Amino acid sequence: MGIEKAKAKLRTIDQVVLACSVALLGNSIGQAVFATEQDATDTVNKLCDYVQSGGGYFDSAYKQLQSKRGGKGSDQPLGFYVGTDRFAFNSGYEKTDPRTQAEFAYALHDFIANHGGGIDNFHRYQKDKATKGDPYDKAHVRFDQQAKFAASWWQQNSAAFEKCLSKNNWIYDAILDGNDVYLTWDWATHSWAGTQQYPEWMEYELTHIAKKK
């Protein structure tokens, strides 16, 4: 009888320990999720400021973005002005508020990175000797994949998109602008600044996307 009571007590202790472990794990996961969400919010805030601001430490970076994008403070309407691809947006996307544009730019970047694309993956492919193929090509997420993501995102986040008569044009404009905004901001405000490889990467990405590749 004493042995059975001891076993029951041990089972109770094990259950308490397990419950505490689960609670601690849940708390850790919750904190990690909160931290991730906070990081995302902070980045979106910075992107939004970057899109809107021409002052402070954003000044030189904003002017570079403005030269490719037009919009506020420019003599050109919001659009895409890279190389021989030069046109104003007229799908309705250009009328969305800067906050929404910043949120989409961040979400698109996150989608690209999670699908093997982006500058970080590009450098990883370059360093990995086992990687086969061109790192530029491997780190490029094709336009049709980005378009599927963009359509879903805008359907969930914009009533204006639902009313738009030319959703394909909206998606095209949004993908061009989202990549342009994020890549230029990332290069201008992070450790890539001053390196030649990042502008080359941006040019590769933007020219391919402009051609829907």
Image (cartoon, rainbow, N blue to C red):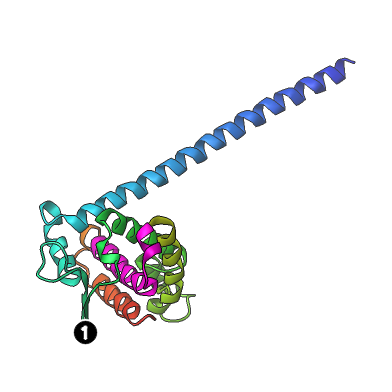
Q: Amino acid at mark 1?
A: Thr
Residue drawn at x 37%, y 71% is: 165
- Which of the 4 quarters of the picture holds residue 19? top right
Image location of residue 195, percent across then percent down? 22, 68
Label 1 Cα crowd, 10 Å radius (few <14 / some 14-19 / many 20+): few
* Range shown magenta: 159-187
Is residue 163 rendered magenta in the image? yes
**Secondary structure of residue under mark 1:** loop
Q: Quadrant of the C terminus?
A: bottom left
Prevailing secondary structure of the magenta residues: helix
30 to the left or right of 78: right
* Labels in figure, total: 1
Image location of residue 40, percent across then percent down? 36, 50
Is residue 171 rendered magenta in the image? yes
Residue drawn at x 10%, y 53% is: 55
- Look at the image and tell me whether residue 36 can be seen: yes
Image location of residue 118, percent across then percent down? 37, 67
Question: Furthest residue to the bottom?
Answer: 84
Q: Look at the picture and state if 25 lies above or below 13.
A: below
Residue drawn at x 46%, y 72% is: 145
Name the one closer to the observer, 113 or 120: 113
Name the one closer to the observer, 165 or 77: 165
- Which of the 4 quarters of the picture holds residue 54? bottom left
- Which of the 4 quarters of the picture holds residue 129? bottom left
Look at mark 1 in the image and give the residue it sits on.
84
Q: Look at the picture and state if 8 lies above or below 143.
A: above
Q: Quadrant of the N terminus?
A: top right
Residue drawn at x 37%, y 77% is: 136
Question: Furthest residue to the right?
Answer: 1
